[in-house]
Image: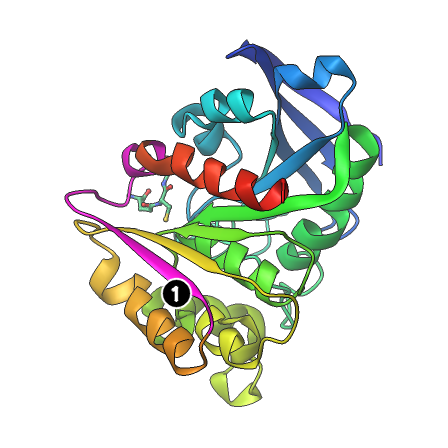
Amino acid sequence: MALTEVSCNKIFGGLQKVFSHKSKEVGCTMKFGVFVPPQAEENKKLPVIYWLSGLTCSEANFIEKSGAQRYAAIHGVIIVNPDTSPRGLNIPGDSESMDFGVGAGFYINATQSPWKDNYRMFSYVTKELIEIVNLNFPVAEGKQSIMGHSMGGHGALVCALKNPGLYKSVSAFAPISNPLKCSFGIKAFTGYLGPKETGTWSEWDATELVKKYSGPALELLIDQGMEDNFLKNQLLPENLMEACKNVSFPAILKKREGYDHSYYYVASFIGEHIEYHMKNLTK
Ligand SMILES: N[C@@H](CCC(=O)N[C@@H](CS)C(=O)NCC(=O)O)C(=O)O
């Protein structure tokens, strides 16, 4: 579990670091970002928020574009953001499109060859990464929340819904809310999980998972830019909200007029999300 420090930059009084390590779950070297706020110098154990990025991203996009460090430094919270898929494996077909393979792990555990040995981003994020973070950084164990964007917004919802109690709260920017019903999701699930007839797809779809969730009370905070090009065909937040309404699952949809799908939008509301998670992490 040795970590190699790849970079370290002071920002807003804290340190934005990037580490690499050999991952058991995904069978390759993985990188992740960790923002350590200034409060860590006081030997305090701090809460953690995990961030999952969207299609085409590495760990760098969030670090460079979200502006999250400003708010994390104010609130005294560690932020951890992994890469979005295994890298460097050169599996045939892993780099042909933006919505499958490298940069598009969908935070699920694949069951189909040739993906099933490495495309295990769900276990990587919910088990291995948490163990590594707890061992190496000044975290208050168990005080963790999760959020993400697009593919990663949905990933955050799935990580929380499939692990009741693991995260104190969950939020999602422009999540791919119902992958069973959109082309990004259908392509990824067909490749990683096999044809729909396998019956396993619903285990990895947040709109299906809210229907059978059982565990500690959880609220879904969904955020959506109303000028997002992916909204109508890929994101389908109305399907998730309808499912939540039908089973009385607490959910909030924040509609942001004029905002698109980009990190300009994420940066505009990341402070609000960090504040939301901090309320839940300090209860
Ligand atoms: N225009 C993008 C479409 C994919 C996209 O919008 N990706 C989002 C997540 S779904 C993203 O965060 N892109 C990286 C960035 O904006 O830094 C591309 O094809 O590269």
Q: Quadrant of the C terminus?
A: top right
- Residue shown at 39%/65% (left/top)? 177
Horizontally, is 3 left or right of 64 in the view?
A: right
User: Position of 90 compared to 127: left or right?
Assistant: left
Span shown in magenta = 249-267
In the rendered image, which residue does mark 1 sit on? 177
Could one spot residue 117 in this view of the protein?
A: yes
Relative image position of residue 173 (x, y in whole percent): 38, 49
Q: How is the image coloured?
A: rainbow
| SS at mark 1 in the image | loop
- Ligand 1 within 8 angstroms of badge 1 C-beta: no
Q: How many marks?
A: 1
> What crowding class fits label 1: few (fewer than 14 Cα within 10 Å), some (14-19), or many (20 or more)?
many
Residue drawn at the location 50% of the way across and 82% of the way down: 195
Question: Up-down: is 211 above or below 30?
Answer: below
Residue that lies at the very extreme toward the front in this rendered image: 283
User: What residue sits 41% from the left and 64% below the top?
Assistant: 251
Q: Foreground residue, 192 or 218?
A: 218
Q: Is residue 102 above or below residue 44?
A: below
Out of 41 and 135, give the one closest to the viewer.
41
Residue 222 belongs to magenta span: no
Q: Position of residue 178 (x, y in %)?
A: 39, 70
Is 278 situated above or below 97?
above
What amino acid type is highlighted by mark number 1? Ser
Would you say residue 119 is visible in this rendering?
A: no
Question: Residue 98: x, y in percent?
Answer: 39, 51
Ligand 1 is found in which quarter of the picture? Answer: top left
Query: Can you say whether 136 is above or below 10 in the image?
Result: below
The structure residue drawn at horizontal position 45% and vertical position 67%, both measured from the top left corner, is 250
The one of 75 and 267 positioned closer to us in this rendering: 75
